Each structure stands twice: as C-alpha cells, then as structure tokens.
Image: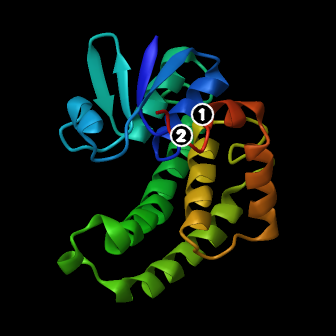
Amino acid sequence: MYKVVGTGRDRSLRVTWTLEELGVPYELVFARPMSDEAKAHNPTGKVPVLIDGDRTFTDSVAIMTFLADKHGALTFAPGTHDRLVMDGHMHFLLEEMDSVLWTAAKHKFVNPEDRRVADVKPVLEWEYDRALARLEGRLQGPYLMGDTLTIADILAVHCLNWGFSAKFSKPSPVLLDYSKRMRARPSYDRALPPADPPA
C-alpha cells in the first residue's frame, strides 16, 4: 500500500485525489510542511512525499504522473499526441498558476520576514488573472482533454482552490462551474480529510 505524507489539504491533496480516482488504496501519514515528521521523509520538509515500498518520492506532479502511468488511467500513452497536449496543460498550470500562487505564499508567510516583498502581490494577481483566462480557453468540453478526465484536471482544480483560499481573483462562471463539478466527484470527498488534524 502506498503512503502519502502531508496534511491532505496542501499539495498532497493532488496525490490522494489521484489515488482515489484510480481506486488504489493508500494511507495518509499526517505531516505539516516543514514539520519534523515531514523532514523525516524529505529533508527539505516539503510535502507531499509518496512512500512506495522502501523508497520515497517527492514533487506532487511527478508523483501524479507516475501513478497515472503505473495504473493506466487519468492519462494517455507516452509518445501520443494526446499525451503531448495533456503534458502541455500540466506545464502551463505549473508555470502560470502554481508558481504564481507559491510565490504569493512565500512573500506572505513562508519566507523569513526580511525576505518578503508585500508589494509583489498586485503583480501576481495580474498574472493569475491572465492565467485564468488562458485556462478557460484550454477547456475542450467537460475537462481539459474533452470528455476524458486526467491528472491535468486534478492539478487545475487544486490551483483554483488555492487561488480562492489565497483571496485571488474569482474565476469566471465557466471555471467556477468546472471547479464545482470536479469537487462534486465522490473521489474528491474521499480524498479530503477532516478539517481537524488527528490528535
């Protein structure tokens, strides 16, 4: 059984949601980012960490891709045009949404106080607004890949959730409907842990 280290509400949700969609059993090992528990599995203290047997792996998108490839769902075969398009969505989301949100978080509470620039947020909000418009243009039906749900959709909705919690711009009605439909999936409810961490 896989183990996923994280809170289930940070980037580790991307991994647990992927596993729920795949129908693969796993155990969530609760650990906040930068905690001693997280550092026991990843010296940087970042989560998620995937434990597969006696090996540990980091970086949420790499883990999602590995799981989808290994279990043959939520993706397309390497070397196909569909995989090229899906991978393009993944890179877009990382470059234009995840990185903007992470930069905002670093300048709000992650970096040491003397390494934060409060004035950076308006620029990041402008970049995020542009990314939202581009994301909407990438939707090709119910999902980014038309009628096929992929890990790109899980990543997209996680970024939309993050933008909402960070009080960035509200997405368009089209993106709000997309996010709402994705979050209504039973797999999302199963992946999302209770608000209160374990004792």
76 or 98: nearer the viewer: 98
**Can the viewer see residue 5?**
yes
Residue drawn 74% across and 62% down?
175
Categorize mark 2 by other alpha carbons within 10 Å: few (<14), some (14-19), many (20+).
many
Percent of width and height locating residue 88: 51, 49
Write down the quadrant of residue 43 in the picture. top left
11 or 196: nearer the viewer: 196
> What number is the disc on residue 13?
2
Q: In the figure, is residue 46 to the left or right of 137?
A: left
**Badge 2 amino acid:** Leu
Q: In the figure, is residue 113 to the left or right of 144?
A: left
Residue drawn 57% across and 76% down?
130
In the rendered image of this protein, does residue 113 appear above or below residue 71? Answer: below
Percent of width and height locating residue 179: 73, 53
Residue drawn 63% across and 76% down?
169
> What number is the disc on residue 17?
1
128 or 158: nearer the viewer: 158
Label 2: which secondary element: helix
Callouts 1 and 2 close, C-beta under 8 Å: yes
In the rendered image of this protein, does residue 148 appear above or below residue 72? Answer: below
Percent of width and height locating residue 84: 52, 41
